[in-house]
Image (tube, helix red, strand yellow):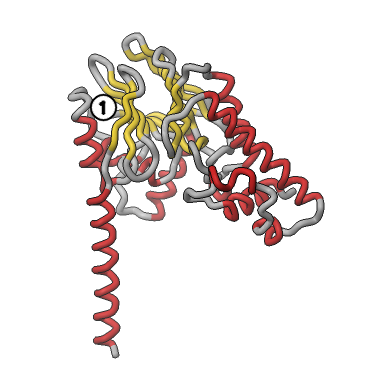
Amino acid sequence: MKHLKSIYTLTILMLISTITWSQEENVTITIDTLTSEVYMLTGQGGNIGLYVNTTNTFMIDDQFARLSPKIKQAIATITNQPITYLFNTHMHGDHTGGNAEFNTNTTTLIAQDNVRKSLEQRISEKPELSKDILPEISFSEELKLYQDDETIMAFHVHNAHTNGDAMIYFMKNNVLHMGDTYFSGRYPYIDLDNGGSVDGYITAQKKALMLIDDHTVIIPGHGRPSNKKELTTYIAMLEDIKNNTLKAIESGKTLEQIKTDTSISGTYDTDYGTGFINPEKLRSTFYTSLKK
């Protein structure tokens, strides 16, 4: 029996290894040229932003560690300049997983204060992790960097996707990286366990709306490049679902009833509900966040 159990366990481990290898092999890093200096890289995980000037490179997020070689190869097709700064929009592993692989002696890692705290906690739980995953520079509310004739402005938005979200705006290029405070073309993942909230998420998007204009290119955390018009529509969608959820809560509906109540989000489910967050998960998140 023990022998059969060992064979079964080994088979499962081999299957998991094969799946992981297959997933990695099947990932292709694609590049969108947004301006003459700003690019978006898509692979598996959060969208990567890349600003390239005459002397160095500014990178936003880095997906998973196992994809770092492919990401580096893709970047090499754009520039041979060193990555001077690497910025994390928040703490999730599909945006910070490659930190140690990119955080070299020539690269400075930057994030909001709460991101560093979360990554420190990750190390305390997994001591085998390298301290290179930690930002060398963190900030509370705002940070500006000046690169050639570009001004890069990073600013914290509170309790949106998480408790440590930051957006990065390239002023001259007019490109805004919103991290996971925006899931273009799909329902958002709002991480309630790590400080996210429905109200904070909508407020963050409205803050972005005040900053940008009709010509701004938006890099979302997930999904295709977007713009002000699409973000405006997205905010209206979230506010409508929020209002419908609040009415359902006020009428005395329970979580289980709201999860199955398609009238709350049904208008948008076909267009936005086919991603990682399906309509039932979304309604559950909205109920949990808005229930007082």
Q: Is residue 249 above or below residue 73?
A: below
Which image quadrant: the N terminus?
bottom left
Position of residue 223 measured from the top left corner of the image (x, y, whole percent): 43, 38
Question: What residue appears at the point 44 percent right and 37 percent down from the top-left corner?
Answer: 221
Amino acid at dot 1: Ile
Whether residue 50 is visible here, answered yes or no, is: no
Q: Residue furthest right?
A: 251
Residue indicated by mark 1: 83
Position of residue 36 measured from the top left corner of the image (x, y, whole percent): 31, 17
Position of residue 102 measured from the top left corner of the image (x, y, whole percent): 26, 36
Task: State the residue in front, 216 or 57.
Answer: 216
Whether residue 262 is visible here, answered yes or no, is: yes
Position of residue 207 measured from the top left corner of the image (x, y, whole percent): 59, 25
Q: Residue furthest bottom?
A: 1
Q: Is residue 277 above or below residue 228?
A: below
Task: State the residue in front, 185 or 211.
Answer: 185
Question: Circle 1 sits in a helix, a strand or a loop, which is it?
Answer: strand
Question: What residue appears at the point 35 percent right and 9 percent down from the top-left corner?
Answer: 149
Question: What residue appears at the point 74 percent right and 45 percent down from the top-left corner?
Answer: 246
